[in-house]
Amino acid sequence: MSAGIKNFTPREVMSELDRFVIGQKDAKRAVAIAMRNRWRRQQVEAGLREEIMPKNIIMIGATGVGKTEIARRLSKLANAPFIKVEASKFTEVGYVGKDVESMIRELTEIAVSMIKEEYSERVKVKAEELAEERLLDLLVPKPAPKQKKKKEVANQEIDLNDINLNDFESLTKSMLDSGDSDENSDGDVKTESEIEDQGLIATREKFRQMLRDKKLDNRFVELDTTPPKQGMGIPMIEVVASPGNFEDIGKSLRDMLSGAMGPKSSKRKKLKVPEAIEILIEQEAAKLIDMDAVVKEAIERVQDSGIVFIDEIDKIASKDKSGHGPDISREGVQRDILPIVEGSRVHTKYGVVATDHILFIAAGAFHVSKPSDLIPELQGRFPIRVELQPLTEADFLRILTEPAHSLTKQYSALMKTEGVDLEFASDGLTEMARYAALANQQMENIGARRLHTILENVLDEISFSASEKQNEKLVIDGAYVKKCLDPLIKNEDLSRYIL
């Protein structure tokens, strides 16, 4: 089973979505069932599994009611590759715009990045160990062959508290100077090589401890910052043969040529130890990751659990059924999208991706057009339709307080960084919800996005002067909200531009 498909029940999915999205029970229920059906499909025998297609969804509702947020939170919950595209940005071949297949290529890029990050976490401990050794090689280089001289400091004890970090190179040198053979406590004769090795080991351990104790954080080292070249795991012919618009073809050719020309010339930088260790960890992790396995798993995850959110699909609905006039372009876009949604093979620079089992969620306000204005073939590929309800004043109040990362919590945290204790009184929250609902009634209904505008206007003066009000407690009550917003609401011209 794909790692991206988690075993959540529909009730658990809805409960999780409730933490971030207020209301819209029908839409949450639809996506919860769709997610569970993906898990159920994986439990079916292989032959039948290929015949079970996802039930794509159309969300109908005004902007700002939670369509995109529901899809985005669902993808995070499922750990699935997710991409949001706007249908109006696509055009059929011959018109200016993006090729429809680019949505799958971009989704695959996202999946590769996701899997690569997961693999990096798996090898992080090993990468940290290797990075530490490489940094010690920079701090304590192996001594060059020297002529024999008396060994004086090979075995001496060093108090870390007495080390002068301004000249640790001289310390290293003094500890590594080699000389004639010495005798150990048992009377055995030590060779010069053995004394050098013991001195090197002792010095590396001293510096290792200093490094872990962060006593070397202010030291500089020279480091090659060029990332190691990684394999793409793809045949070169697929890069050249990938169909798409000129932008995609140009990108593929650049990638192919950069690979053919080999890795970039190394670039050395002088960095502080903490910065150097981060770069070394990244380089060592890249060496430990098998990119062929990353690409293979990424393609599997795209095919089994990928989610494509097509916004503004109502903008390409053709109202002129005669096939003439300006709407012919919109219908052309629909016909280009159709094979992707039906199930096709898309060439990407990582290989061929099948779209048969990708979940497509379309969304649109459908103020002017309606879902039945889409071409019948495309309508048939979106069997589930849910209507999202406009947000009420009560919904706005819940949005301000209930979500795990509500706007009020965000603004309080921002002011906390200035030493200001920002508190929202209950009557202040009620007034902001009322003004948001009122503004949406009087002007264009932009849903919950109106709350961003309301809060920015309410907190404008506080945000500007917060740095001068350290250790103060500020309460946003109903009277303060009215003082900030009443002039704007009453002045219709101002409200149109500001709210």
Image (cartoon, grey):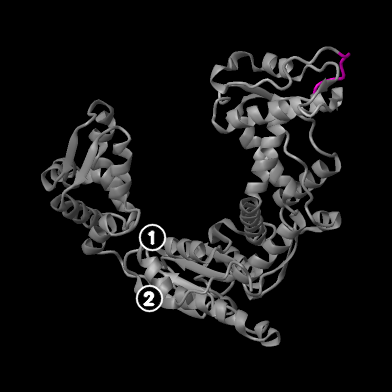
According to the image, label 2 marks what residue?
A: 26
Please name whichever residue, 188 or 321, is drawn nearer the observer in this view of the structure: 188
- Closest to the observer, 246 or 238: 238
Q: From the image, state whether disc 1 or disc 2 is nearer to you.
A: 2
Q: Are marks 1 and 2 in contact (CB under 8 Å)?
A: no
In this rendering, position of residue 371 left or right of residue 158: left
Residue 48 versus residue 132 in the image, above or below? below
Q: Which mark is residue 63?
A: 1
From this view, report whether residue 153 is shown above or below residue 345: above
Report crowding for label 2: few under 14, some 14 to 19, many 20 or more residues within 10 A (C-alpha): some
The image position of residue 187, as x and y in percent, is 82, 26
Which residue ends up furthest to the front in the rendered image? 186
SS at mark 2 in the image: helix
Q: Name which residue lies at 23% across and 55% down.
A: 442
Question: Which residue: 72% across, 17% down?
Answer: 153
Amino acid type at mark 1? Thr
- Residue 254 located left or right of residue 312: right
Q: Which quadrant of the view contains residue 280?
A: top right
**Above or below, comparing residue 376 to residue 313 in the picture:** below
What residue is shown at x 29% (from left), y 51% (from top)?
A: 451
Amino acid on which the number 2 mark rests in the picture: Asp
Q: Give the range drawn in magenta.
A: 143-148
Mark 1 or 2 closer to N-term? 2
Residue 213 at least partly seen: yes
Where does residue 143 sit, x and y in percent of width and height?
Answer: 80, 21
Q: Which of 96 and 218 is in front in this view?
A: 218
Q: What label sits on residue 325 in the rendered view?
A: none
Q: Residue farthest to the left? A: 479
Q: Residues within 10 Å of mark 1 (few under 14, many from 20)?
A: some
The quarter of the picture where residue 345 lies is: bottom right
- Label 1 residue SS: loop
Residue sitting at 29 percent across and 38 percent down? Answer: 416
